[in-house]
Amino acid sequence: MAINPSIITRDLDKVAETTGNIYESIHIIGQRAKQISTNLKEELNTKLSEFASTVDNLEEVFENKEQIEISKFYERMPKPSTLAMEEFMEGKVYYRFPEQESAE
């Protein structure tokens, strides 16, 4: 039985290292995951809209092989939370705290 490569034990100290607070780090990762998810969803919907049919009759609707392949490709992609965690750990996520900036 193969273990999902997205299931990785993380050192919480390393996750918290960048911000100094594990909760802030997790919040930033969560926000980035939402951005990634939204972008992927828009991209998928754009690609699938090319196959949209104006036919309402179910007998006339048939499975499009290209559409299925596109959907399967997106299903096999890593989850947005996994991508966001990797970006954060590699220092590729830009974040700021506006409330702290306004106080200074």
Image (cartoon, rainbow, N blue to C red):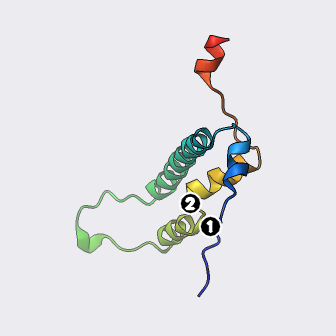
Residue located farthest toward the bottom when viewing the structure as drawn: 1
Q: In this view, does 19 lie above or below 70?
A: above
In front of the other: 74 or 37 = 37
Foreground pick, 70 / 99: 99
Q: Position of residue 5 (x, y in %)?
A: 65, 71
Quarter where residue 60 is shown: bottom left
**Residue under the point 47% across and 58% down:** 48
Q: To which residue does mark 2 refer?
A: 79
Please give the name of the residue rendered at 76% of the width and 44% of the height, measured from the top-left corner: 91
- Location of the C terminus (image quadrant): top right
Please indicate, yes or no, whether residue 87 appears anywhere in the rendered image: no
What is the x, y in percent for residue 32?
A: 59, 43
Residue reaching furthest left?
A: 57
Say what secondary structure mark 1 lies in: loop
83 above or below 8? Answer: above
Q: Residues within 10 Å of mark 1 (few under 14, many from 20)?
A: few
Task: Please state the horizontal and vertical placement of residue 7, each as a whole percent of the image.
Answer: 61, 68
Residue 42 screen position, x and y as percent? 50, 48
Between circles 2 and 1, the one closer to the viewer is: 1
Evaluate if marks 2 and 1 touch, with contact meaning CB atoms under 8 Å apart: yes
- Which label sits on residue 6? 1
